[in-house]
């Protein structure tokens, strides 16, 4: 059993490592809340493994329409992002709790542990939940013919999230320094 004094350097090392990792992460923010429905997503978003993704969209649940993250298309083994939080925030203008008052939906995603690189499509759909159930196939695809037949409105938006790991040293640096 080691004494507390002997464990102090180890604890200090763990603290420094944690602070280093946390200090390197950042939040990639995509604010589409002022674009109306449907918004225009960037084609591609580039992130690093420790980053977080926060997407903000206009939403008015009093109409029945809400944003939904469509993850059904992506096999579990291929998912590089995890939905950490989905939160509705009421608008700060107008009367509080006023019926019909719009707000924003904020989706927060984290990169799955041990993912150093890869790509994943993020699809968000603005629809009424009870109508989306009628047109969303188990594969995650939307049955457009059935939606048209039923006269249902929905608004899918997509982007590709690309995770890239920054390389601090090139392979030639490792060879020259004898680190390999």
Image: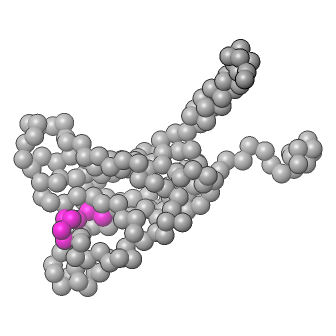
Q: Position of residue 54 (x, y in %)?
A: 41, 47
Judge by depth and name the residue closer to the eye, 157 or 21: 21
Residue 72 shows in the view: yes
Q: Identify the residue shown where x is 41% and y is 53%.
A: 83
Residue furthest to the front in view is 1
Question: Above or below — where is 24 with respect to 142?
Answer: above
Looking at the rendering, the stretch of residues picked out in magenta corresponds to 125-131
Residue 34 shows in the view: no
Q: Is residue 72 magenta?
A: no
Q: Position of residue 7 (x, y in %)?
A: 70, 21
Tell whether 144 sits left or right of 7: left
Q: Identify the residue shown where x is 52% and y is 51%.
A: 111
Give the quarter of the figure containing the N terminus: top right
Q: Position of residue 170 (x, y in %)?
A: 80, 49
Q: Position of residue 71 (x, y in %)?
A: 40, 65
Judge by depth and name the residue closer to the eye, 53 or 114: 114
Question: Above or below — where is 134 with respect to 119?
Answer: below
Tell whether 157 sits left or right of 116: left
Q: How is the image coloured?
A: one colour
Q: Is residue 129 magenta?
A: yes
């Amino acid at each position: 059993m080691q004494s507390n004094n002997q464990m102090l350097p180890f604890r200090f090392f763990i603290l420094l490592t944690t602070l280093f990792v946390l200090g390197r992460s950042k939040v990639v923010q995509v604010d589409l809340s002022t674009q109306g429905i449907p918004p225009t997503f960037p084609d591609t978003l580039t992130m690093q493994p420790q980053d977080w993704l926060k997407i903000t969209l206009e939403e008015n649940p009093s109409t029945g329409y809400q944003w939904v993250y469509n993850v059904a298309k992506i096999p579990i083994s291929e998912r590089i992002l995890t939905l950490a939080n989905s939160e509705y925030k009421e608008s700060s203008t107008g009367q509080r709790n006023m019926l019909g008052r719009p707000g924003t939906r904020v989706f927060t995603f984290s990169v799955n542990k041990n993912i150093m690189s890869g790509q994943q499509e993020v699809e968000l759909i603005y629809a009424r939940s009870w109508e989306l159930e009628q047109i969303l196939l188990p594969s995650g695809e939307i049955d457009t013919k059935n939606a048209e037949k039923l006269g249902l409105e929905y608004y899918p938006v997509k982007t590709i999230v690309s995770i890239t790991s920054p390389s601090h040293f090139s392979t030639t640096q490792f060879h020259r320094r004898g680190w390999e």
